[in-house]
Amino acid sequence: MNEVPDATVNLYGHVHNNEPLRVGPYVNICVEHTEYRPLPPVAVRRLALARLDDPRPRAATTAEEIRCLDT
């Protein structure tokens, strides 16, 4: 999804090249970015809300980004 409606975050995954995190209202939930572990829905929601406030990734992977929210 290249265009995301306002106040919406696109959760995406299944990337084949371990692409870096996108700038914008996107959260990459592919296993390469989640340390091959499921993410708690509450953590994904917190990250999505954070991305609406600031669209820039805070880390190199989604798992790291979620940990950054806790600090």
Image: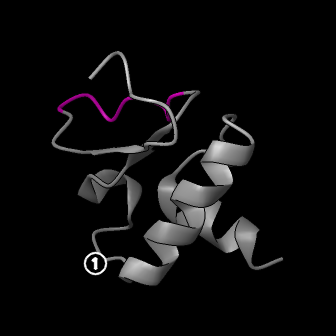
Point 65% across, 40% down: residue: 57
Point 73% across, 46% down: residue: 53
User: Which residue, given by chain and number where applicable, does mark 1 sit on?
Assistant: 38
Q: Disc 1 marks which amino acid? A: Pro
Q: Is residue 41 visible?
A: yes
Task: Give the residues in magenta.
Answer: 16-22
Residue 70 appears at what percent x and percent y? 75, 79
The vertical placement of 31 against 23, above or below, is below
Q: Quadrant of the N terminus?
A: top left
* Helix, strand or loop for disc 1: loop
Residue positioned most to the top: 2
- Number of numbered callouts drawn: 1
Report the side of 59 relative to 1 (left or right): right
**Residue 20 within the segment the image draws in magenta:** yes
Quadrant housing residue 18: top left
Residue 29 appears at what percent x and percent y? 32, 55
